Image (tube, helix red, strand yellow):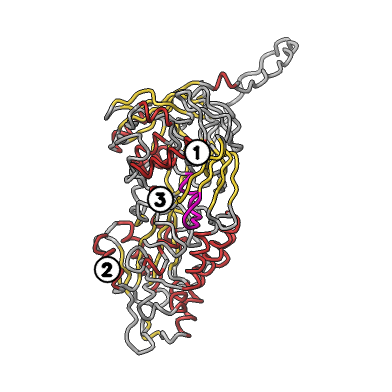
Amino acid sequence: MSRLFRFLLLAVIALGVLVACATPTPEPAPTKAPAPTTAPAQPTKAPEPTKAAAEPTKAPAPTTAPAATKAPEPTKAPAPTVAPTVASKVGGTLTLPANDPDTLDPHQTSNPSSYDVFALIYETLVTEAPDGSYVGLLADSWKISDDNKTITFALRKDVKFTDGSAFNAEAVKFTFERILRVGTKSPIQSTIKNIEKMDTPDANTFVMTMKDPYAPIFHDLANAYAGILSPSAVKAANDDIGRKPIGTGPYILKSWQTGQLIVLERNANYVSSLKFFDNKGAPYIAERRFKIIPEYATQVASLEAGEIDYLALQAQDVAKYGKDARFKIFDSFTTGLTYLGFDTKKAPFDNPKVRQALAYAVNKDEIVQVVFDGALAKVACCAIAPSIQGYDAKLSQYELKYDPAKSKQLLDDLGYKVSGKYRTAPDGKPFQPAIYTTTSNTHGKIATLLQAQFQAVGVDMQVKQMESGALLALTPKAEHDLYLNGYSWNEPDMFSLFLSCDRLSGSNRVLYCNQDLEKLIVAGRTTLDQTKRMQIYADAQKLVSQEAPWQPLYMNVNKVAVSAKLQGVKQDRTGGLLLHDAYFVK
């Protein structure tokens, strides 16, 4: 399964708890992965208050004869700190709020609440490491054919399902064939459909051959929806495993009271192969509980009462819990970003120089400080968000950073001259581009700030807000000038979804079509070598930065309160909590 111990971000998604002042959920990519093709896709703690000065010095008491001096007691050496043993770490219950899953059959749902639970029960062939690379989980290693179509997985030999049956190549094949058979609700069924042939030359080798090279295959195989099932368990349950999930993962379903509570218990026989964990055995936390509490106010009350150990905070509670010693505050990041887009099919925004000139007028730092109090968002430099594989901070050198003087000069050079307070277009008419965005309070605040920033360089920008549905229906018609919204996707192939020529009538809201980018999109989708693939996406980001169909603005930051009793917590690059080394202080 993917991001095995990364409950933080998944829980945020499952609960739908976004920071209150954060941008509403950006437009997501289609639920299902785009059909594989060689062409582009269709589709601190707060500072302690200063202490008062010391009490004024009191007058000395009358001097009396000194008492006889006693020999000082010998100083005792401090007791040595004893590191907790493995045995002493085992135990405790981690409880978090959740919504009720519909099923724990990974092939019969796309519900995030279900995912959060079965992601601890099932494991996948590969998983994503904290640095964003893909490493083996149930697979020891793999080889990729020269044509990028065939992947040969060497499987681990030390794994068993929790029903005692053997994990082997037949179980992998059985799982993927079942997705094809019953997985119409699975977000990865289209990916599995691209597998033309599956072979099991021996018990520890699984070979899959794809119809077309599809690089995001590792992303999809690292997803818990691709968790490997126990064939014997599925057959024993007559294919009805919604409440009888059996996997190889670190936890086992203990009980499920619909609408109340789901309890998972540790798999005492679990063996971890992941190098980024110190613990190579079963998890230390004895039970993971998902308490069904949909309402945020009730979640807060439960946190205060000590009934839950974790809560994704809304903005009004961040300061309070940031000062509360009972909790630690962790940052997590959304996989996506909000951007200012230009209608590249409509003059004058079809001219990259005009887009660049306006991009230089944008003060992203001001947006983050004013709208998000400098804490609930992070400035984004590039088309790929910092939370997504493929992001490289070095690419910020290509960012069109805030430079109002350069913005003014470029506009002057392009013939947009100041006439009175604002600029006119080269034809002498008033230059009054309109920014279209949703009716959300946050988008309204950002649009107003952008309006003031544009006015500072002489551009009289207008603000038009409309319901999301109407806005999304408007963009394919190329009737907008500027567009303020965002995207949500967790794979660098986001270019094929949001900036591809094949998406002009859908999710490409800026109507950008560039053949050089198309070539990079195709290469990125068909190159399975991850190092080469990341270089392709670096090149794509350079091109997009220079062409400026978007000016990336920010990535949302979520604040999560976690019980301070939970120690050994690690985080991945998205801020997700890695809990296999975690334990409760007793």
Q: Residue at x 53, y 56 (%)?
A: 391
Gap between marks 3 and 1, in whole Å? 57 Å
Q: Which residues are magenta?
A: 209-222
Residue type, label 2: Leu
As for residue 219 lying within the magenta part, the answer is yes
Mark 1 = which residue? 48
Give the mark toward the camera: 2 or 3: 3
Task: Give the mark nearer the N terminus: 2 vs 3.
Answer: 3
Give the mark toward the camera: 3 or 1: 3
The part of the image, by quadrant, that contains residue 426 is bottom left
Mark 3 = which residue? 193
Residue 10 on image: x %, y %: 41, 41
Vertical relation: 356 (above or below) 184 = below
Say what secondary structure mark 2 lies in. helix
Gap between marks 1 and 2, in whole Å? 50 Å
Residue 157 on image: x %, y %: 58, 31
Task: Give the mark nearer the N terminus: 1 vs 2.
Answer: 1
Residue type, label 3: Lys
Task: Give the mark nearer the N terminus: 3 vs 1.
Answer: 1
